[in-house]
Image: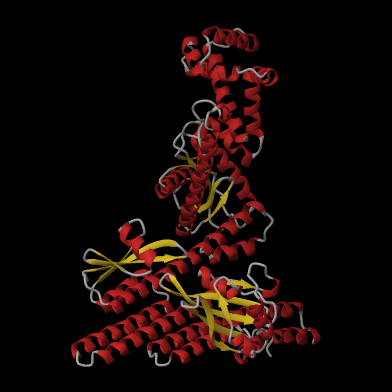
Amino acid sequence: MPDDQPETPYLELLARGAPAEAYERPVLRARAEGVSAARLAALERAKLLALRVRGELEGRRRREAELSALFETAHDLAGLRDLDAVLQAIVQRARSLLGTEVAYLTLNDPQAGDTYMRVTDGSVSARFQQLRLGMGEGLGGLVAQTARPYVTESYFDDERFQHTRTIDSGVKDEGLAAILGVPLMLGSGVIGVLFAADRRPRVFEREQVALLGSFAAHAAVAIDTANLLAETRSALAELEAANEIIRDRSEVIERASEVHDRLTELVLRGGGVHDVAAAVAEVLSGTVEFTEAHTAPAAAVDRSRAGGHAVRHGEDWIAAVSASGELLGALVLRGHPRLDPVDQRTLERAAMVTSLLLLARRSADEAEQRVRGELLDDLLDAPDREPRLLRERAARLRADLDAPHVVLAAGIDAPGGAPGGAPGPAAGPPPEETDEPDRTGRAHRAEGADEAAGRQRLWAAASHLAATRHGLAAARDGGTVLLLPLADGEGADSLARRTARQLGTAVQAAVTVGASAPVSAPAARPGEVASAYAEARRCLEALRVLGRGGQGAAAEDFGFLGLLLGGARDGAGDAARVEGFIARTIGAVVDYDARRGTDLVRTLDAYFASGMSPARTKDELHVHVNTVAQRLERVGRLLGPDWQSPSRALEVQLALRLHRLASAIAR
């Protein structure tokens, strides 16, 4: 083996599909032969790369097996002849792909009000194979009753389920411990449950729950299709003389089979909701479109959602697209006032497939948002992270952390001007003095819920913006923080203003954005990201204190005030100088208020805001003019007789503004 080709043995191991432990042998053999350290390092790198490739290949083989099983199941449904054979194939494939010892399927009996064992695979107990579960009893009865999947690592130790002697005896006879059950849904109703189980404790992963749910959807379609075929055969037997009706029914069934094949193909190749609409429109010879929940006809959508069927709306048909009680939108078939029942069911199935695609896309988006947020949290909270690992994680998100970035702090401003979306001061007496404390409490709770909803909308909008700009976003400190790349020729101030406009449009509220100075390479210097975030938050608070809520700005936009806002990143010197200026100019007044509990600083603010008019000042403070005069006299004794001269008054006003700004940032 040539010394400059360390990958050769690993290529051979990959080619013959060797187990993971075999990849250590070339390194051990080379170490035993006393090869150079460089050669050993090269072998280690080649081994790690080969193991990564092996893991990718294993994952692809597993995904191919899952897709193949789904395709084979769909093929069986398309040529459905024997319902028992199809259901048996589904439980066999579910058992094989999930690697469980047992898989089984139960169907609901509406007359008896329970669910009974229909098909099993891997079962050895006759008692278990004849079980009937009342609604709400055991894991399966709970799935059948609630239409929600349930999973347990150890059934007998799980107190969530209603244990009965009959069910527990059957499960104990079979020796089951870990059980996963998913509902068989037909429209909005449950017709049965599909299970996968092991005889030892086990944790089922989310992907395994989703996979079993896909098989359950196919099983429900198989049962429904079989019922439709049975109805068709009955109609043909009763109407043998009606050749035209027979031909029409056959064409409808062919269309249903065709659209089912088309929808299955779309799901397998990752199509979108508009692809589903186009496929259904072609099969039904009409115009089908997907509409968002807020644009669909509300009354018709509510009827479709409640009944689980497509409903007629004027000349159109509407099928609600929903999942787990959440309305996601609707499919609208236009120009078909008279729709065949099978075509109606086709539209309903298309709505079900659309909901699955929307949920899959949402899950993928949420997963990516979480990953982006976790990476930004690590940059903010763990500055000692290895730069190489940060770059690798960022590359998977298509983010380049070696390029200049800007940290932005964003928050929603309430209509009343209170920061962070919090409610402003209430008019009238405090809650304990009102005649209706319960109503006040409910109002406060409602305001809190609105504030939380606003923060959630802001985080979602920021995550979407970060994904489109190849940046990062995370929820933090009651608002949102973003790390966005800086385009050539763009400044932090212009990026802050643009971000404030984009987020404000997305959440339909005023969004204030403070920006840091650019961070040249976050991956190389992750410690600077936390300092930049602190600077961005200071800019955010400064905008609010200065009455510029709903805008975006960086420290450079504030002129002299920028020394206070940006000082933490460049050193504490500028901030210390500002604090000294405040202490020299109005420190005596600030200290007097702190010691005596007086309100001289607020009086000075109102005095200058009122054009140095005591009469207008007393109106602003709602006190007597003599009180204003007494306070100003006290200020004169503290600051000196010339405090109202033009030069001193300017310094006092600037010090007051800086003091208010520094107090807001400190909070």
Front-most of residues 268 and 200: 200
Depicted 73 relative to depicted 330: above or below? below
Residue at point 41%, 50% (across, down): 506
* Relative side of 287 to 636, left or right: left
Residue at point 40%, 62% (across, down): 328
Depicted 654 relative to depicted 522: above or below? above
Image coordinates for residue 6, horizontal then vertical, percent: 67, 84
Q: Is residue 555 visible?
A: no
Front-most of residues 63 and 483: 63
Residue at point 61%, 61% (across, down): 390
Outermost residue, front side: 112
Image coordinates for residue 130, horizontal then vertical, percent: 58, 86
* Relative side of 339 to 464, left or right: left
Image coordinates for residue 346, horizontal then vertical, percent: 33, 77
Depicted 382 relative to depicted 547: above or below? below
Residue at point 68%, 20% (across, down): 591
* Relative side of 306 to 344, left or right: right
Q: Is residue 648 visible?
A: yes
Quadrant of the snapshot with the N terminus: bottom right
